[in-house]
Structures are given as structure tokens and as C-alpha cells.
Image: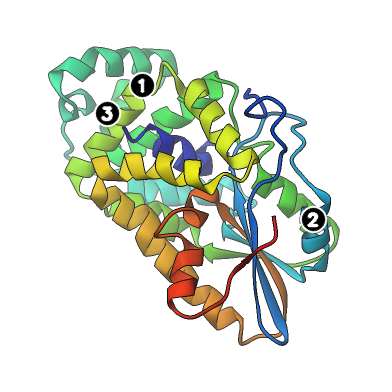
Amino acid sequence: MLRRLSIAFSALLAACASSGEANAPVKPGLWKVADADTTVYLFGTIHMLPPNYKWRTKTFDKALGKADQLVLEVVLDKDPKKTAEIVKRLGLSPGLPPLLERVPEDKRAGLTKLIETSKIPMDRLDAMETWSAATTLAALTLRQANITAADGVERQLSASFEGAGKPIGGLETTEQQLGYFDTLPEAVQRKFLVSVIDSTVDAEVEFTKMMAAWSTGDTGKIATTFDEELRFSPELGEVLLRQRNANWTEWVKKRLDTPGTVFVAVGAGHLAGKDSVQEMLAKDGVKVTRVQ
């Protein structure tokens, strides 16, 4: 149920598919918000891509070339140890019940198999909060399907801006992003873990569906995908999508007060559907124009 969300968000920790429908043009969604002296581009990303996947277009490159700054959801520290320290601080707690006891009995065999495949010691997983164990195991599932963040959009964009000596910023910190998981009610965290167990068989299939919707800029399909997930767990949707979209909407509105051009790249799910950043901006009277 929460499979697509687990695939999308575990990219942070993870740091193969077709191009989608046959003959469909590859044109991921791109929007623009502008006033007299400021332009903010909004680009919907997919955090993981197959090696050598061709997704950039002339329209995209023209917009990117105008930008003075790149802004991502989060900028990971170049020292992985610092990120690991945050994960450890937020994701480990004493006195937790064994991980197997945190899922229904009919899911324990699947969880046991997943843990055995991971080769992660059981006592290490038992010490993790449920969300942390879930994202750790989800990242493993994606790696087994040859899906990683190494060739993701964010990595490619970051390399381009670093090479050009242009600044890169984040809408959130690593601690804030992981904190969204950490503050989820335990019942929701356990649903998340069950979704990871259920997704082990078809992670590659789910990712291929995501790729098809993203690569063609089909916001309708992207929205439908996430709406299905959020109906199952409204609490997760409120924290991971709606609340964050509202925060980013305010960021864009405030950024319009500073002259220049900025390229904002966030997960495509945040730019699709009735609770998208574009819809929230429109409700506040801000004009949003789709350019691709």
C-alpha cells in the first residue's frame, strides 16, 4: 500500500527500469513562477534513475542555464559519517520490542526472509525505531533491484552546479527530513514497515510505473499513484506531502522578494494533484505556468 512512498523516500538513505510507455516522449514536468525581477523554476524529479538514462530536453537545459542557484529538498553532507550520526541519533531507541513483534503474525515470515537476505544482525534491527528499520530494509530492496540514487536527478543537477561554481541550497535539513519519519505515530510506522515487506517482490515493477509517469510528465498518473497511497494512510500523507508542500509554497512566495533565478528540484509527487505546490500557490493568487 505504501510501497511507492517507501520507494520514493528511501532514496535519502539508499544514497532498471524502462523509459516508460513505448515511443512516449521523455519530458518530465517543469513549471515557472515569476514576477518583474525573479523567476523560480519548479522541476519534479525522480530520486533514482537507471545508468545513462536520457531525460534532459532543450527546454529543460535552457531553464537550468538561466538559474543562479539550485535548491533541492535536502543537501546531504559530503561527509557520510555526519548523516549516519543523525540517523543513529533519531533512529535508535532503548527498550523497543523485537522488530518481528511489531508486525502482524502473517507478515513475520516475510520480514524474517527480508532480514536474512539483508544480512543485518537482528539485534541491530531490534534497536532501531520502526521507521528506521523500514527505510533501511527498503533501501536494501531497491539495491537488489539495481535501483540506486547514484544516477538520480539530484546527483546530476548537483554535479552541474558544482562544476559551474553555482550555489546549492536545501528546503530542509537532513535532520528535518528524517524527523518527519521520526515523529510519525508508531501505528503508522508499522504500516510503513509492512509496506516494505509487501514490496520486496515487485519493487522493480513499482519503480517502472513511477518512471513511466515521471518521464512523460503525466501529473495525473503521478497524482493517482500517490492518492492511492494516502487514502491508506492519511497521517503519512499529511506529514510527508501536504505539510511539506505548504512549507515549500511559503518558501517560493518569499523567494519572489529576492531578484534572480532559482531552479527548485523536488520529488515529482510534490508537484502533482490537488495538494501540489502549484495548486497551493494558485490558491494564494500566485500564477504558475507550465513550460514543459
Residue indicated by mark 3: 194
Label 1 amino acid?
A: Pro
For disc 2, the marked residue is: 59
Q: Residue 277's x, y, as percent? A: 48, 64
Marks 3/1: CA–CA distance: 19 Å
Whether the residues at callouts 3 and 2 have beta carbons within 8 Å, the answer is no
Residue position marked by numbered label 1 in the rendering: 121
The location of residue 224, given as percent across then percent down, is: 41, 42
Q: Residue at x 42, y 35 (%)?
A: 4
Question: Which dot marks residue 232?
Answer: none
Q: Give the side of residue 207 with respect to residue 22, left or right.
A: left
What amino acid is found at the position of numbered circle 2 in the picture?
Answer: Thr
Vertical arrangement, residue 47 with respect to residue 24, above or below: below
Circle 1 residues within 10 Å: few <14, some 14–19, many ≥20? few
**Nearer the N terminus, badge 3 or badge 1?**
1
Question: Viewed as shown, does residue 263 lie left or right of 114?
Answer: right
Q: Amino acid at mark 3?
A: Val
Up/down of 247 relative to 233, above or below: below
Q: Can you say which quadrant of the picture contains the N terminus?
A: top left
